[in-house]
Image (spheres, grey):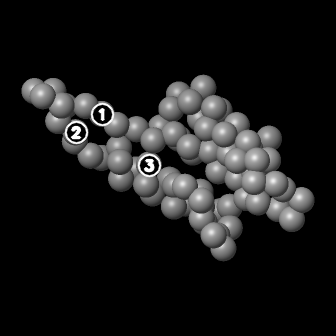
Amino acid sequence: LVLQDCSLDRAMALADDTRKDVSELTIIAGSKSVAVTVSAGAAEMTSTDSEESVLGRADEGLAAAQHEGRNRIISSSRF
């Protein structure tokens, strides 16, 4: 998800709200309930970033979120 004119703090809040909303859903697959979680990385584009570099930082955040136990949002500001 790419957000235009959105600060990193606001993007983190939106992503965390989405994460919480998704985790509260009940997904039925056949006769089973399936828990769904969201892991994501967030990064803010600076004047020196390319599209690839900002997406790379967001991807690093995603990898960290998955490594740290999933169902979390990690900001590129940690790196």
Residue 31 picture quarter: top left
Q: Residue at x 63, y 32 (%)?
A: 63
User: Distance of mark 3 from mark 1, alpha carbons?
Assistant: 12 Å
**Horizontal relation, residue 6 to residue 44: left or right:** left
Q: Earlier in the sequence, mark 2 or mark 3?
A: 3
Q: Residue at x 64, y 50 (%)?
A: 42
Check disc 2 and report the residue beneath it: 27
Q: How many marks?
A: 3
| Badge 1: residue crowd in 10 Å (few <14, some 14–19, many ≥20) | few
- Please provide percent x and percent y for residue 57: 74, 44
- Viewer-nearest residue: 56 or 17: 56
Q: Position of residue 51 (x, y in %)?
A: 75, 54
**Measured from the top left, where is residue 55 in percent x and y?**
70, 47
Q: Residues within 10 Å of mark 3 (few under 14, many from 20)?
A: some
Q: Position of residue 34 (x, y in %)?
A: 25, 31
Residue corresponding to mark 1: 35
Q: Spatial distance from mark 1 to mark 2, Cα to Cα?
A: 7 Å
Front residue of this view, candidates 30 and 26 = 30
Q: Mark 3 = which residue?
A: 19
**Which numbered dot is residue 57?**
none
Q: Amino acid at mark 2?
A: Ile
Residue farthest along the left direction in this orientation: 31
Which element carries disc 3, helix, strand or loop? Answer: helix
Tell whether label 2 touches label 1 (CB within 8 Å): yes
Judged from the image, the secondary structure of the residue bearing numbered disc 1 is: loop
Quadrant for the N terminus, please: bottom right
